[in-house]
Amino acid sequence: MSPSSRQRRITPASGAYQRRSRMLLVLAPVAGFTLFAGAALWWFADDVGLHVPSWSTGAVVMDEPQLSVDTRNDLRIQLQLLQSQWQRLNALDALQGKGKARPAPAIALSLQPTAHISDADLRERVDILSRALDQRLFANKPKAGSGRLMPVNGVTPSSNFGLRLDPFSKKLSVHNGIDFVAPLGTPILAAEAGTVKTAGLTPQFGWSVELDHGNGITTRYAHAYRLWVRAGDRVNAGEKIAEVGSTGKSTGPHLHFEVRYNGAPLNPLRFLAAR
Ligand SMILES: [Zn+2]
């Protein structure tokens, strides 16, 4: 950030912010982006995400947008889930005789459910513990023949895991996965071998598939146009399980991809990087 730029604290609901998002939607096609409106919003949302504290390209600098009550609750729930998964992993290691329980980063375990904590601290703790859990789970490459693959070929996924601007409510919210923008009907592939846990239609995820990879790890593939598997099917890594669509709570054709450890959302980019 240049020292001359005046720092202003504004909330996502403020006029300047909304003007900027509108302007982006108008400018996107002009600038040659082929993204649809929703994707443009997500792209924009990356700029106010966890790892980009300020937006310094214009006169207005984004600095620590206030979280909505819903987002705070989501983050608290996410932190508690991550904390319990860390303890569960310790218990599992103890059962398998893998030696002493590993302490989590102290700061990430120090939250009492009733304690007051600032928005920034809450986000930091979720991020620290999520990262530590990812490293613990995915530090080792999978065994030969059980590799991981990108669920959509030839598409760079977004990096909007964590906080982002919700394309529907236009408020900061927690995004539990990453998105692959691709044309309708593009094959969705199993990221790792596993068993189909669920395959069906839900209001939020539309036509979606959940794969169970064992050891508490599951992946979800949402907003599909059409499914190619049924619950109980065994699938190999890279096998076609569905086609990209825009069913459920979606603004245009894309794959919403999640990785969870016993239900706690992990950053899919780190899961996919360990392959
Ligand atoms: Zn998504």
Image: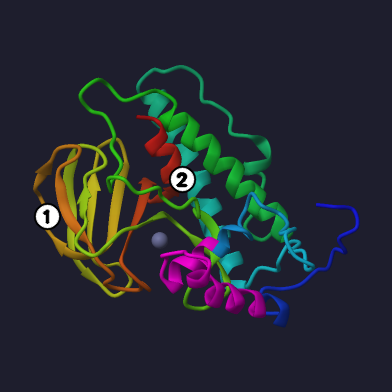
Name the residue beneath numbered marker 1: 231
Q: Is mark 1 within 8 Å of ligand 1?
A: no
Q: Which of marks 2 and 1 is nearer the N terminus?
A: 1
Q: Position of residue 254 (x, y in %)?
A: 33, 62
Closer to us: 25 or 130: 25
Can residue 124 be seen by looking at this rendering? yes
From the viewer's side, name the closer residue of 35 and 38.
35
**Residue 166 in view:** no
Q: Nearer the viewer, mark 2 or mark 1?
A: 2
The amino acid sitting under disc 2 is Asn
Q: In this view, does 6 lie to the left or right of 208?
A: right
3D distance between C-alphas at marks 2 and 1: 25 Å
Instruction: Give the quadrant of residue 21.
Output: bottom right
Residue at the spot 70% in from the left edge and 60% down from the top edge? 119
> Element type at marker 1?
loop
Q: Where is residue 13 in the image (x, y as percent from the top left)?
A: 67, 79
- The main secondary structure of the magenta stretch is helix
Left or right of 42, for residue 96:
left
44 to 128, vertically: above or below? below
Residue 189, position as x, y percentages in the image: 21, 47
Dividing the image into four quarters, tell me where ligand 1 lies: bottom left
Single out the residue that lies furthest toward the right. 4
Q: Residue at x 28, y 37 (%)?
A: 149
Q: For this rendering, which residue is in front, 28 or 189?
A: 28
Q: Label 2 belongs to which residue?
A: 267
Q: Is residue 80 magenta?
A: no
Q: Which residue is drawn at 30% across and 67% down?
A: 253
